[in-house]
Amino acid sequence: MPPGYPPPGYGASVGFNVQLHRPTSGLAIGALIAAFVFAPAGLVLGFMAKKEIQRTGADGDGLATAAIVISIIAMVVWVIAFVSILSTASSIHHDFNNFGPGPNGY
């Protein structure tokens, strides 16, 4: 071992556990998961996480923002799909009502 270096296993850092990062908000993590499972819950939890992060200074602001954006996109997609399905069902119903015997009874 070169002179001037302590033997392995000794030094000032022994016994110290320094945490250099802030904890991530559990609410932000839950919001992101909920955004994929049930978008309205993800949206609400995302805004709640943003408020908690502002208050406590925890990490997870990006997760909360992602949860909000994904929830909004998912809800817009669901609304478009719902309107499209209703429109298609209405069109099909209208088409079936026009079937029937023609002018000659056939």
Image (tube, helix red, strand yellow):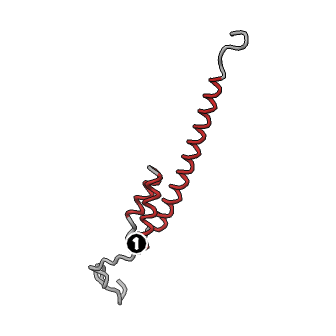
- Counting from the top left corner in percent of width and height, residue 101 is at 67, 13
Residue projecting furthest to the left: 15
Q: Quadrant of residue 102?
A: top right
Could you tell me which residue is drawn at 48 percent across and 59 percent down? 67
Query: Quick one: SS at disc 1?
Result: loop
Question: Can you say whether 69 is above or below 58 in the image?
Answer: above
- Counting from the top left corner in percent of width and height, residue 89 is at 59, 33
Question: Can you say whether 73 is above or below 1 in the image?
Answer: above
Which residue is under mark 1? 58
Side of 95 where 9 appears, left or right = left
Could you tell me which residue is drawn at 47 percent across and 68 percent down? 61
Few, some or many residues within 10 Å of mark 1 (<14, 14–19, 20+):
some
Residue projecting furthest to the bottom: 4
Amino acid type of the residue tagged 1 in the rendering:
Ala
Which image quadrant: the C terminus? top right
Q: Quadrant of residue 16?
A: bottom left
Question: Can you say whether 102 is above or below 29 in the image?
Answer: above
Side of 80 where 62 appears, left or right = left
- Counting from the top left corner in percent of width and height, residue 10 is at 28, 82
Of 23 and 39, nearer the camera is 39
